[in-house]
Structures are given as C-alpha cells and as structure tokens.
Image (cartoon, rainbow, N blue to C red):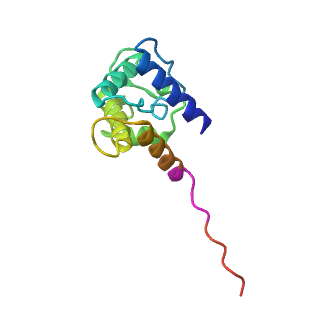
Amino acid sequence: MLRMGIVGLAALVLVTSGCGRSAPSDDALNDFVPPTLAKRDEVRQLLEKRFDERDADGDGRLSRLELGNTRADRIARADTDQDGAISKSEFVARGLERFDEADANKDGMVTNKEQAAARAAQGAKATPATPAATPAT
C-alpha cells in the first residue's frame, strides 16, 4: 500500500511539474498508476513513452526479459493475441483500461478521490475475503 502511495505521488509530481521522468520498476504492467488529474490523452502519451523506454531492442514488443518481474497472470491479461509478448498497442490498451476503471464518472479525468477509490477496490480484489467462522454444533 505504501508503494502505491509513493508511485501515485511520483506520478502526480511528474504530471504537475511537466519535467523529469520516472524510472520503470521491475513490474512493467503493474507499476502504472494513472496520474491524478490527468486527461486520458495525456495518459496514452505517457504509456507510449514508457513502452518505448522498456523496449530495449526496439522491436515493438516487450519480451519476458524486458517485462522484468511482471507476474505471468498480468502478462497473459495484457497479451490479447497470445503471442507471448506485449505489443505497444496491448501495453497502451491495458494501461488505458486501468485509467478507465479509475475514472468513475467517465469524464476523461481521474481525480484524487477516484484514484483513491480505484486503489481501495484493487486492494480489496487482491485480498481474499476470510470466510466467517461457523459455530460448532
């Protein structure tokens, strides 16, 4: 949770300052958090830039090596054509999907409140519910 807060804060600083760039983490598909108060088109540009930074060999695809420590389930979800690599269009589509999930009112912007709610929802999905104890009979 602390990592998500730090990543979100870094993204906010980058978007509001208009300078600098963040270094990609080891998890290429999970580390993207839509910047707060950014427009969808700005997020698309950021995703395209991040893809280009990760595409070390310039072949237009992210291999397992270029994806770093990204979990196999995240790769499978983004790899819509099932060819074992993530194309730029797949990478951007997955990032925009996350943006759209966070954009609760569908106005093309993600506010602080929407971002916090999306993180809370994602955290709830990641943490399985503990079944209620049944009384002994």
Counting the numbered discs, the total is 0
16 to the left or right of 126? left
- Residue at image point 48% right, 49% down: 121
Q: Is residue 118 magenta?
A: no
Residue that protrudes farthest toward the right in the picture = 136
Quadrant that contains the N terminus = top right
Q: Name the outermost residue toward the bottom.
A: 137
Q: Is residue 88 left or right of residue 122?
A: left
Residue 126 in the magenta stretch? The answer is yes
Q: Position of residue 130 (x, y in %)?
A: 62, 63
Quadrant housing residue 83: top left
Taking the image as drawn, is residue 66 in sight? no
Identify the magenta region: 124-130
Specify whether residue 129 is in view: yes
At which x and y percent is residue 123?
A: 53, 47
Q: Measuring 30% from the left and 39% from the top, which residue is drawn there?
A: 81
Residue 92 % position (x, y): 33, 30
Q: Quadrant of the C terminus?
A: bottom right
Classify residue 41 as left or right of residue 102: left
Residue found at x 27% / y 27%: 41
Residue 105: x %, y % from top left: 31, 45
Q: Which residue corresponds to the image point at 38% horizontal and 39% vertical from the top-left?
A: 98
Q: Nearer the viewer, residue 68 or 34?
A: 34
Furthest residue to the top? Answer: 19
| Quadrant in the picture for residue 132 | bottom right
